[in-house]
Amino acid sequence: MPWPDRMLPVAPARQDTGPGWWWLGVHGGAGVSTLEQAVPGGRDAGRAWPSAGTPQPVVLVARSDAGGLKAVQSAAQQWASQLVTGVELLGLVVVADAPGRRPKALRDLLYLVSGAVPRLWEIPWVEQWRLGESPLTHLPKECAPLARDLTRLIRPA
């Protein structure tokens, strides 16, 4: 596994939060604050790997543009190289950066980076989110399986 180009910092996990998972935005503007509202149960890791005595469940979050996907690639390399310990990587959420079909180069890059994480969830473009409207009033159908999967992963039957 190649050494990551950029590395995210590691920070102590806040203990004031209950069960759930950490949303780790791998770059600014990834969509973490929107996902916190749209998919209850997760909390913002503050763009740093959460570190604690017990393994911390983490979901990487990125936009679907080239910069976002390359940031995912670096974060996945950092995790796979065991430069981060005490993390249970649940998967990756990719939030669309534009309406419509993704260009082939970005589809190919997403295919490549998604192979380095356990699961991939994709959230489509939501114009109302761009305009600052509440994620709760314009919830794409893809949020329901994401919430269901994460809840099952955190609280197995």
Image: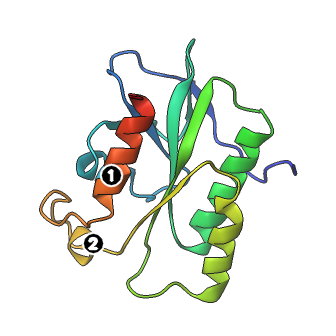
Where is residue 119 drawn, in percent x and y?
56, 52
Measured as percent of width and height from the top left, residue 34 is found at 30, 54
Q: Are marks 1 and 2 in contact (CB under 8 Å)?
A: no
- Place of residue 21 in the rendered image (x, y in percent of width and height, measured from the top left): 42, 34
Determine the residue positioned at 27% across, 72% down: 130
Around disc 2, counting alpha carbons within 10 Å, would you say few (fewer than 14), some (14 to 19), or many (20 or more)? few
Q: Gap in Å between the C-alphas at discs 1 and 2?
A: 13 Å
Secondary element at image label 2: helix
Q: Earlier in the sequence, mark 1 or mark 2?
A: 1
Which mark, residue 35?
1
Q: Residue at x 76, y 33 (%)?
A: 83
Residue type at mark 1 is Leu
Eyeballing the image, is 107 above or below 40? below
Q: Is residue 90 visible?
A: yes
Identify the residue at image location x=68%, y=78%: 108
Q: Label 2, on which residue? A: 130
Residue at the limit of the structure toward the right, as seen here: 2
Looking at the rendering, which quadrant does residue 17 occupy? top left
Q: Nearer the viewer, residue 20 or 37?
A: 20
